[in-house]
Amino acid sequence: MSVVDHERFRYKFTSEDFKNLTYFVADLGRDDSVYNEEKLTQAQRLAHLLNAKLLALLRELEELTRGVDAFGGIKLEMAIPHKSFVTEGDTTEFDRLEIYAPIVTLRQFVAADLTARKFLDGSIILINENRTEVPPEL
C-alpha cells in the first residue's frame, strides 16, 4: 500500500529520524514567490507561508498518514527565496525552512483542539538550521 497519492502532490517524499521519532518528510522544493526583503522580514515571510500554504498542507498530509504507525511526525522542508529589489542586480538568496510537527499535536490541531500557534509551539521550526519561534504575525 502506498502512503501517498503521488498524482495529488508534486513533492519528494522520504522519511527521517529526528529526536527519537521517525518523520514522514515532504520536500516542497522552493516557493514560487521571491519575497522582497524591504517589505517582509524573515518572520513575516514565515507567517505568510504558514497561513497561505503550509498549515493546510500539514492537514492534508496528516490525513494521508493517518493509520500509518511508522511515523511519529511530519516534516516539511522548503526553500524560501528572497532578495532586495532596491539594489539592482541583487541575487536571490534562499532561507531553508524545516518544520518538524509531532503527529500527536498535529492531530489535535486538525481536530480543532489546538490553535495554530499552540500546535506550532509544540513543533520544531528551523530556518537555516537555527530554531525559531512562531512569528507574532501568525
Image: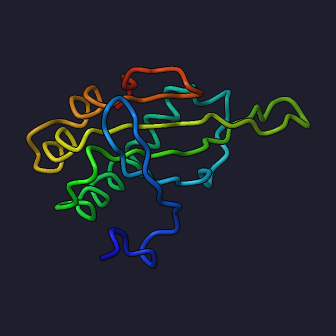
Relative to residue 111, is residue 136 drawn left or right? Answer: right
Relative to residue 105, is residue 136 drawn left or right? Answer: right
**Quadrant occupied by the C terminus:** top left
**Quadrant occupied by the N terminus:** bottom left
Percent position of residue 26, x then y: 46, 54
Percent position of residue 90, x then y: 86, 34
Percent position of residue 84, x then y: 76, 31
Relative to residue 26, is residue 38 drawn left or right? Answer: right
Residue sitting at 67 percent across and 45 percent down?
Answer: 34
In this rendering, the count of numbered labels is 0
Residue sitting at 58 percent across and 30 percent down?
Answer: 40
Residue sitting at 54 percent across and 28 percent down?
Answer: 127
Instruction: Using the image as rendered, state which of residue 9 and residue 55 is in the foreground.
Output: 9
State how the image is colored. rainbow
Q: Is residue 68 above or below residue 123?
A: below
Relative to residue 110, is residue 39 drawn left or right? Answer: right
Instruction: In the displayed orientation, state which residue is furthest to the right.
Output: 89
Q: Quadrant of residue 66?
A: bottom left
Instruction: Using the image as rendered, state which of residue 11 and residue 34 is in the foreground.
Output: 11
Q: Is residue 34 above or below residue 65?
A: above
Percent position of residue 119, x then y: 23, 34
Instruction: Using the image as rendered, state which of residue 45 and residue 75 is in the foreground.
Output: 75
Q: Is residue 131 above or below residue 46?
A: above
Q: Quadrant of residue 105?
A: top left
Residue sitting at 55 percent across and 45 percent down?
Answer: 78
